[in-house]
Amino acid sequence: MALTPGLGPATFQRLLRQFGLPQAILERKRTELASFTTPAVITALESESVAQAVARALAWAAEPDHSIVTLADETYPRPLLEISDPPALLYAHGRVELLSRTAFAIVGSRNATQQGEANAEALARALSAAGLTIVSGLALGIDAAAHRGGLAGPGSTIAVLGTGIDVTYPSRNAALAAEIAQRGLLLSEFPLGASPAAQNFPRRNRLISGLARGCLVVEAALASGSLITARAAAEQGREVFAIPGSIHSPLSKGCHALIKSGAKLVESAEDVLTELSGFRPSGYATTQHAAVVPEAGLLAHMGHDPVDVDSLCSRAGMSPEQVSSELLKLELDGRVAALPGGLYQRLEKGQRR
């Protein structure tokens, strides 16, 4: 039934409420199903192409560390039962036991800054050390950094895909996806072979937030898909968090809008853990910094916002050649990141990549 074209989750659930388990639905006459769906869907339900798709899915599920988790299974994640349209089944590759753990979502821009990725990875590592399983969407940028941080701790990570579970997207994250399949969990509601269609990702996003106790946004433009995840989290009754940034950065606008709307401002893992009522971590790692040591040299003139060479020359009283030489040394040392448009941004200590 889940593989029948046109038979969506809402119709599937109405059928389940009316007739019971899928076997009982499949035993019903066409006339009994006609009031719930179209004749074309009923014909497709009995088609050879659907039968072949079922055979492929069962063959996939027979492989080691592969599972198909249905609404009737004990391993089905309980938080998803609280959302308005839980998927009838989930394809899982990896540690399916992670579905029973307390989870936390971290999402953000695909075109993240180096500092944003470092922040996401550090927070995910600290929250994973506290026992939270980090959920994200395997996208480039913040998602990938969150997964890396989750894998670094005992909480591990769940990657929710917008494709079939046998399709790696984006391809640049193939190695990360393979590592998650071994040490974490890949999860998808889409059939095997499903391509990365645009309409899949908003549906994927509701599962990212639905699996989690809360959702943290790290760098997001106002039109970012991460805000869709944050809105879904709020609608599902989850806590929403955001990291603030420079007032000049487009990637801070989405986070600032969330904070204005009531999202919790986050500077460290402690800010998240304090808000998750009922979650009692034991010996979690901190992301707070030790006492600040004054910066020396060019760093003392950089501030935290992106800055160009001419401004640094004026602030530091140095020539363009001297500033460029110092910036190169700082960049090689992982203390400064070069940004588009001839701008440079300082990276915080302890968050170098």
Image: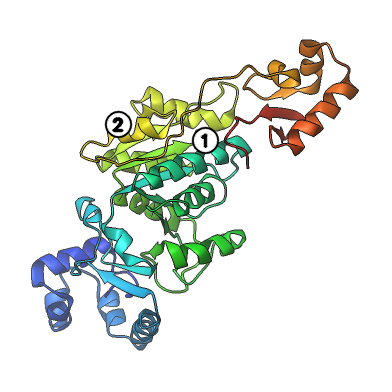
User: Which of the two labelled residues, at mark 1 and mark 2, occupies the earlier sequence position?
Assistant: 1
- The percent coordinates of residue 275 (x first, y second) are 28, 32
Image quarter of residue 240? top left
As displayed, is residue 154 above or below residue 347? below
Q: Residue at x 77, y 16 (%)?
A: 311
Q: How many marks?
A: 2
As displayed, is residue 188 above or below residue 290? below
Q: Secondary structure at mark 1?
A: loop
Report which residue position mark 1 lands on: 219
Image quarter of residue 13? bottom left
298 and 225: which one is in front?
Answer: 298
Q: Residue at x 38, y 75 (%)?
A: 65
Q: Is residue 209 left or right of residue 106?
A: left
Image quarter of residue 41? bottom left
- The percent coordinates of residue 264 (x first, y second) are 35, 28
- Near mark 2 (Cα within 10 A), the count class, few <14, some 14-19 or many ≥20, is few
31 and 203: which one is in front?
Answer: 203
- Near mark 1 (Cα within 10 A), the count class, few <14, some 14-19 or many ≥20, is many
Q: Residue at x 46, y 54 (%)?
A: 151
Q: Amino acid at mark 2?
A: Thr
Residue depth check, mark 1 versus mark 2: number of the one nearer the observer: 2
Is the C terminus in the top left, top right, bottom left or bottom right quadrant?
top right
Report which residue position mark 2 lands on: 274
Q: CA distance from mark 1 to mark 2?
A: 22 Å
- The percent coordinates of residue 270 (x first, y second) are 37, 32
Q: Amino acid at mark 1?
A: Glu
Q: How did the renderer colour the structure?
A: rainbow
As displayed, is residue 143 above or below residue 352? below
Q: Secondary structure at mark 2?
A: helix
- The percent coordinates of residue 344 (x first, y second) are 72, 28
Is the N terminus in the top left, top right, bottom left or bottom right quadrant?
bottom left
Q: Residue at x 25, y 55 (%)?
A: 80
